[in-house]
Amino acid sequence: IADLVISQAVLQLVDDPPGIYREMDRWLKPDGIVSHQIDFKSYNVTKEWNGHWACSDRLWHTLTSKRRGQPNREPHSTHLCILTSLGYRIACDHRVVSASHLSRSQLAPRFAHLSDIDLTTSGAFIQAQKPGQPQA
């Protein structure tokens, strides 16, 4: 059991972010801290840093199938949602903001729901605290 779980530029590459977060939750003591640096860019697969959100799943697979270590394309809000659904309190959410040159009409249907915050968040440093044990 750990007091702290740290990841550095890893969570954007995992195939099952909710599963990885649940596994980290199992490792962490009550009141423990997670600290994650996450990159939301396309890894130069597309011209725009966030152009991967304009690609259909099929096109993205075609573009990346022969490349190792490609982003899972989950946006900033997904990571916050997973943490809060596990009961974590967000202690720090420092976003790296980059201009987006994508119009909403260019987004793939899967990403049409993205907020302006997601569309301009190219990276984030997120720290959160696991809930403590219930008081008796």
Image (tube, rainbow, N blue to C red):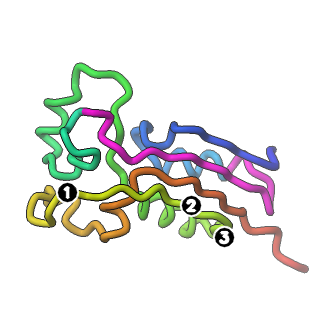
The spot of residue 108 in percent (x, y) is 14, 56
Q: Residue 7: x and y, percent?
A: 61, 40
Label 2 to label 3: alpha-carbon separation? 14 Å
Q: Give the amino acid at mark 2.
A: His
Tell me the number on the disc at residue 77: none
User: Which of the two labelled residues, at mark 3 and mark 1, occupies the earlier sequence position?
Assistant: 3
Q: Residues within 10 Å of mark 1 (few under 14, many from 20)?
A: few
Quarter of the image holding residue 89? bottom right
Please identify, in this view, whether the residue under mark 2 or under mark 3 is nearer the observer.
Answer: 2
Residue ID for mark 2: 94
The label shown at residue 101 is 1
Residue 16: x and y in percent read 43, 44
Residue type beneath disc 3: Arg
Whether residues under marks 3 and 1 lie with C-beta atoms below 8 angstroms apart, the answer is no
The residue under label 3 is: 89
The secondary structure that most of the magenta stretch takes on is strand
What range of the chain is rendered magenta? 26-44
**For residue 38, side relative to residue 4 (left or right):** left
Residue at the image position 66 percent from the left and 52 percent from the top: 25
